[in-house]
Image: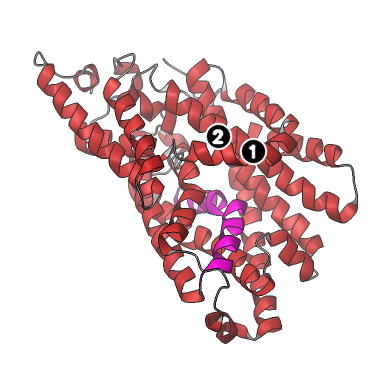
Amino acid sequence: MKKDHTTDADFALTHVADSHRKGFWPMLVVMLGFTFFSASMWSGGKLGTGLTAWQLIATVMTGNLLLGCYTGLLAAIAAKTGLSTHLLARFSFGEKGSYLPSFLLSITQVGWFGVGVAMFALPVQKVTGWNIHALILASGLVMTATAWFGIRALTILSFIAVPSIAVLGSFSVGNAFTDFGGLDAWFSMVPAEPMGLFTAIGICVASFISGGTLTPDFTRFSKNTKTAVSTTVMAFFLGNSLMFLFGAVGAAFYQQADISDVLLKQGMIVWAMVILGLNIWTTNDNALYASGLGFSNITGLPKKWVVLANGVVGTLAALYLYNNFVGWLAFLNTMLPSIGGILIADYFMVRKRLYGHLDKTRFETIRPTAILAWAAGVAAARVIPGIAPVNSVLAAVGVYLVAEHVMGLIIKNGERPESEAA
């Protein structure tokens, strides 16, 4: 399937050309914009009311270590191949089988886009009294318009939003320390309703595991593997950790898990509307961009038109999604980590880093080993005690490797079609 690179600067259905690869700083900004995720502040707020300061630090470091390992491996694959998550899935799931992860990942991102639009519009409506439907429509369409322009717009927007949210969060944390007695007061606080550490680490990991599975959609533009892995790991330890800290400190002192309520109490709501709006904007554009790549893999349509359709759907359904879809999205999150586990196992352990060019690869239609491993990962996330996303990834990797070994014993007449093409 050959594609004219001059008409598709986002390479939705092919490898990223060397001429479009980016260096360390542009990729770091994009990945920081990716990890500066508003929902992580809300998750940090939940942790801040249930953990001591030392427990919070240990939880966030452990959670981001797990996320960094998971996303770093996916980043390495993407940089080496120049392929998105959805195109990588063709090797392990099969050409038509890749539609399953593409659909699950894309519909989740459209859902988060709608939730993000409402997250921005509702606090603005609360302060200004403006019509909520008009706010949702205007903000959703603006976010969709920038996502239309792809990775270039994401880079520009991230250059503005990342330092802005870092400054706002730092001011908020500084005000909280000033108002309540500084670091000593925070470290001496004991939560009224303590939270278990496994539960807390699970919240930290689950807050970004679905987005983390889409890491290749962005890191495929990296100039080399070192750039992809280093910027991804740094973004999680810096960006995601800061988001949790910003949410947790305010929640611990003000007993408000919603960062908007904390900023309102601090008299910073006007700045919050602007800067949190930018933060949600980058998050939503990343979600819309990734969903466009996924549905392009399924339909073969140009990513830009799919992005436009997804943005319209997410905007029109924003209030419904906000009020009714969060629980469903949480359920979908249990269905996604195993996808990344299978991609990692297939590339590093089964194919030994030997992926051929898409145009020269004969894909199987559906590969049952991947479907079986995905189902095992979903089951592990649902029923095995511990950290659900981690259970999902490990179970998927284990089942996939065993299934591939058994399949190799059954098929004795040669290598798989992909390996022949590689």
Give how far across and how far down residue 151 sits, in percent. Answer: 56, 38
Tag 2: residue type? Thr
Q: Is residue 128 left or right of residue 6?
A: right
Q: Is residue 31 left or right of residue 251?
A: left
The residue positioned 68% from the left and 65% from the top of the image is 256
Give how far across and how far down residue 38 sits, in percent. Answer: 62, 53
Choose between 221 and 177: the one closer to the eye: 177
Where are the magenta residues, as a range? 22-51
Per the image, the residue denoted by label 1 is 113
Label 2, secondary structure: give it.
helix
Tell me: residue 157, above or below residue 320: below
Q: Quadrant of residue 404?
A: top left
**Is 36 part of what is drawn in magenta?**
yes
Per the image, the residue denoted by label 2 is 108
Q: Main secondary structure of the magenta part?
A: helix
Label 1, secondary structure: give it.
helix
Give how far across and how far down residue 85 sits, in percent. Answer: 42, 33
Tell me: residue 327, above or below residue 234: above
**Is 77 part of what is drawn in magenta?**
no
**CB under 8 Å between discs 2 and 1:** no
Asked if residue 150 shows in the view, the reply is no
